[in-house]
Amino acid sequence: MKLSQFIADDQQTKAQILALIELAKTIKNCPNDFASVLQGKSVAMIFEKPSLRTHVSFDIGIAKLGGHALYLGQQNGKLVERERVSDYAKNLSCYADVIVARVFEHSAIQGLAEHASVPVVNALCDLYHPCQGLADFVTIAEHFDDLSAVKLAYFGDGNNVSNSLMLLAATLGVDFTLVCPEGHGPEQSVYHQAQQIAKASGSKLVLTSDVSAIGEQDVLYTDTWVSMGDDTKVEDILASFKPLQVNHYLVAATGAKIVMHCQPAHLEEEITTALFDDTTYSVVFQQAENRMWAQYAVLTSLFEK
Ligand code: NVA
């Protein structure tokens, strides 16, 4: 399956997402078969925000596929404050074969994709974190044979990570419950879009602030209560978010089999240290590892003949 770009979770069909998940698992099984996929290719990686897993998994992953990754940190702030996004895109297209970008605003990803003559991969923006979402479904698929029977619940801030999970779940037919405090729900346009997709796929999509009413779940997921670029003070939201903390009580109440977190984790805020470290449930490092395999699948698909 050939991809021309990878910038948002509403742009891939169910068949394409399933193919990417399968390809990631195949590459994970026999990485040597893919060792020259990026031979002679260079990837320019723009980072407007900090990164550990994304930066390292792309950098090392690209090297292992035979390519060359160039890190372009943006210590001076947003892309648009230095040059037009269109000029970044056109300049980088002169040298690079792929542009990977972590940006503040999704419009910057769209601008890069519009003006670059090479594929663009979204490495996180305000609306989506598609590489994380794909890696997470690789992880879920490693634990559950039938994805369509999985019940996934996300607790916390309606953000880029929950948007990606929600759109992917809706597309794949996975039941998805989003538990957010009042006023911290998902971007309305993304929620409406996910509702439409869920209607078509038959997946059940629930948005609630009532943690006691969510019933049985297979997978519990959480992320930071305050994302990068959000200047909300944790002290100001603590009282409304604390009931949504993912902990052993929630695992027992829902009967969940696995617990996920994209990291970095704010221990004792969105998740307890005890649960984060409890490898009976916590699959956080499997998720982190799968970032690389999922991104291999994306990069490989960009260059499929
Ligand atoms: N929602 C988080 C994800 C970090 C990987 C953020 O945007 O900061």
Image (spheres, rainbow, N blue to C red):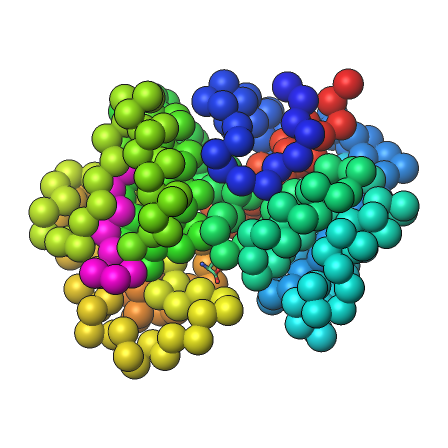
Is 246 a magenta residue?
Answer: no
Magenta stretch bounds: 176-184
Residue 62 shows in the view = no
Percent of width and height locating residue 19: 54, 21
In the picture, measured across the screen, residue 126 lies left or right of residue 90, that is: left
Q: Is residue 75 above or below residue 129?
A: below
| Residue drawn where x is 17% and y is 55% of the image | 209
Q: Is residue 204 above or below residue 217?
A: above
Q: Nearer the viewer, residue 27 or 16?
A: 16
Percent of width and height locating residue 76: 71, 75
**Can you say which quadrant of the picture contains the N terminus?**
top right
Residue at the left extreme, as displayed = 213
In the picture, measured across the screen, residue 118 lies left or right of residue 19, that is: right
Q: Nearer the viewer, residue 107 or 179?
A: 107
| Residue drawn where x is 63% and y is 46% of the image | 110
Percent of width and height locating residue 105: 56, 57
Number of residue marks: 0
Residue 198 shows in the view = yes
Percent of width and height locating residue 13: 49, 23
**Can you say which quadrant of the picture contains the C terminus?**
top right
| Residue drawn where x is 53% and y is 40% of the image | 8
Report which quarter residue 73 is drawn in.
bottom right
